[in-house]
Amino acid sequence: MLKHQELIDKMSLTEKIRITSGKDNWRTEEFPRLGIPKITLSDGPHGLRHQEEEQDHLGINESNPATCFPPACLSAASFDEELLYEMGRAIGIEALNDHVEVVLGPGVNIKRNPLCGRNFEYFSEDPYLAAELSTAWIKGLQSVGVGASLKHFALNNQEKNRMKSNSIVDRKAMYDIYLKAFERPVKEGRPYTVMCSYNLVDGVYASENTVLLKDILRDRFGFEGVIVSDWAAMNDKTASMKAGLDLEMPGGADYFDDELEENIRSKRLDEGILDQAVDRILELIIKTARDKHVSEPADTFSIGKHHVLAKKIALESVILLKNEDHILPLRKKEHGTIFVVGALAEKPRFQGAGSSHIIPYRLTSLLDALKEKGVEYTYFEGYSLETGHKPDRFSEDILKAIGKDDTVVFAAGLPDEYESEGFDREHMRLPDEQNELLERIARISSNIIVLLYGGAPVELPWIDRVRGLINLYLPGQAGGEAAADILFGEACPSGKLPETYPLRYNDHVTSEIYGRENYEVGYREGIYVGYRYFDKAKKEVLYPFGYGLSYTSFGYDDLSLSHDRLSREGKGEILISLRIRNTGNVAGKETVQLYVGKTESDGYMTVKDLKGFKKVSLEPGEEKEVMMKLKREDFLQYDLSSGKEMIYEGEYDILIGSSSRDIRLKGTVYISGEPYIKVPVPEFYSRPSGKPSLEDFETLIGKKMPSRISEKPFTVDNTLFEMSEVPQMKIVIRKLSNMLMEASGIKSRNDSAYKVIHAMFMQTPIKRLTLVSPDKMPKYMGEVLVHIANGEFLKAAARTRAKK
Ligand code: BGC
């Protein structure tokens, strides 16, 4: 019996179908006759992007102002679940205030490679960290009765051709890395909705992938809420419904609905499946309407309070990466005039481009914050944030002004157009002009502190020539204040890197393959993602996962484990305790990290995995006991030969560290379980060095990588990108791009907002373009484009000419 059977019985087949696709970009259908209201879904995840009027889903049109909290790339560095809970709750309160029922976030996709254009929206290369923090965020948001939408399920780890790329991964990597990031948020966070991704997985669109949606998400993880399509991710609604998807977004195009109705009438789709989806959608509508009345009233929301929270989160997350001879914190009086160089100090990058782009209530730059503090500084713009716009004489003026003993705060970072939703970065470098200017200043001054902005790691060729490095990632609307407080020691840095900083891009295990494939994307590195690769390959890195300095220091002592064995029987757990002491002169916070690895980790297995962390606040000289817990299930890992998760019997290292490469305390436990039977895998997977070959990967997955079949003649499943080599389409695309630019009101093709819509426009299959185009381009228009691409129009024109 369905929860809302009575209501469903009152709905006609057409009404039931209508409720499974939205009313427009952001709202579900409403049925006043039945007392079913509409609900609104709006983007997040680091603030609310709620649009009332002009609609788009890519951050181009205005949205209501909201608090811009630090995006996940930075907030993850807080290693602090309570803060993420607070952020989720604050966004929930803003959502209530704007009458939004579901916020589209958090994003927990794994950072497989630093160049993914959307890494800024994701938490980590590590699934445990991503899962813990997102669970807290979801609980915070939903504590006020606003639903979350955990996204993008699954294996969406590149922006390139994101609508048609096919992620192929071995089962162990799929379970231990990529799905792990979703498991706990689903099971414990209990998000009201989960959003499927655009890409295909193993040859099947995620939006209609039964293995992903039904077998894993519903059956294995027990998800009972609404599965919503990413915006225009739907390809075949009947197939999607069969796989367990409930809600198609955006709505308004009714592209699939006639066909769906026909399929139900002709019994190709069981009406019971539709009823089940309708039931879940009704439950979402009723639940969000009901819960928001019992939660904190929206009028307790204060912009000021949320700005303070945005600053607090930034302060707790900013990472001090280098502090040679304690150049930091700066002391106002001792440093005389400070030179601040770099356009980002004035126009900070504080969030990324695309659907998560919001209009902040307030924004403080570093310069604003320094002024506010009464710090004397001389500012030089130094470089331009716009491509191809060389600032005249900038560097010469700076070089003349700066003296040998002067302190230089250099704001470096990625301009907006470098990284965004919709496309990936082309390389891991900062713009050349920034690197060059920094090198030139370094020839004069040896007191350079770099403030780094950007959603993902960059190569730092000048790192040995600067004394201080603070990574702000994208710090949200209060980033300037946070940076100034850290610079001047009004706050002590405590962020830890949620991802590895390699020495150079080429050291990355996927550097030779990432972004090269348009279609068939083999995750050749398997489980060796992020620090798991660098650890197993024993490769040097610039800054390891979990790394971050403080203005004080910490001593670790007295590790004790409640058990040295965990038997198979019972639900045993190990309590881990240790003592931590602030051994410096200022108050500070340290994130104690717990890693676990099988002592004998030969074979296709990681050396260690993060399994716990605790952030501890300590006054100078203060000592505290830290307690953590390991349960039996924390030792589970996917076993390739049996095709299920198991616990391998044997000894495990319990490692307590200040980073993944700074292990301070070590213990061991013996865990009873299944015998580990080594699966024969290519050498790379048991002793990684260099990069895995295609043959290695094919042996691992036990099949050949598919190759792309010919796509001609073109159909509505093709994209404009795929048609772009056809001469007549070059003209059509140019014309349409011009129209797009005009319609969006954007002046330059280098503008990141334009790049996002253009990427979306080129990469969306023609039939789905009708779903996202502002005026819901009629179906036949898509067919016209296909005819043109196939040369049918030209042939017809030639025939007409011949007749004349
Ligand atoms: C993005 C989602 C977003 C949705 C709605 C999509 O393009 O991938 O993350 O929630 O648009 O804006």
Image (cartoon, rainbow, N blue to C red):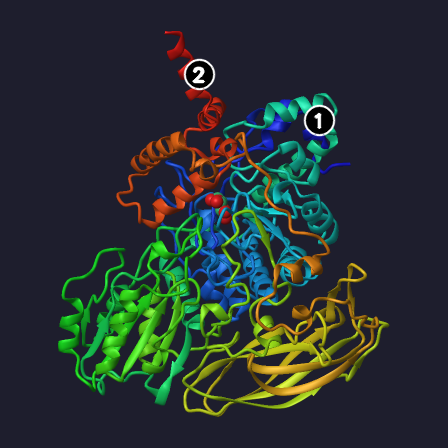
Q: Residues within 10 Å of mark 1 (few under 14, many from 20)?
A: few
Whole-percent x, y for residue 620 in the image: 45, 90
Q: Does label 2 point to a residue whose CB lies under 8 Å from ligand 1? A: no
- Quadrant of the frame with the C terminus: top left
101 displayed left or right of 222: left
Q: Quadrant of residue 4?
A: top right
Residue under pointer 2: 796
Tell me the element at label 1: helix
Front disc: 1 or 2: 2
Q: Residue placed at 35% from the left, 31% from the top?
A: 731
Q: CA distance from mark 1 to mark 2?
A: 51 Å
590 displayed left or right of 332: right
- Quadrant of the frame with the N terminus: top right
Find the residue positioned furthest to the right.
569
Whole-percent x, y for residue 779 in the image: 49, 24
Q: Is residue 309 visible?
A: yes
* Dot 1 or dot 2, earlier in sequence: 1
What label does residue 790 carry, if any? none
What label does residue 9 carry, if any? 1
> Could you say which is closer to the camera, residue 239 or residue 550?
239
Amino acid type, residue under disc 1 in the picture: Asp
Q: Does label 1 point to a residue whose CB lies under 8 Å from ligand 1? A: no
Q: Residues within 10 Å of mark 2 (few under 14, many from 20)?
A: few
Tell me the element at label 2: helix
Depicted 722 relative to depicted 149: above or below: above
Count of marks placed on residues: 2
Q: Residue placed at 42% from the left, 47% from the top?
A: 49
Find the residue positioned furthest to the top.
804
Whole-percent x, y for residue 137 in the image: 54, 59
Amino acid type, residue under disc 2 in the picture: Ala
Circle 1/circle 2 CB separation < 8 Å? no
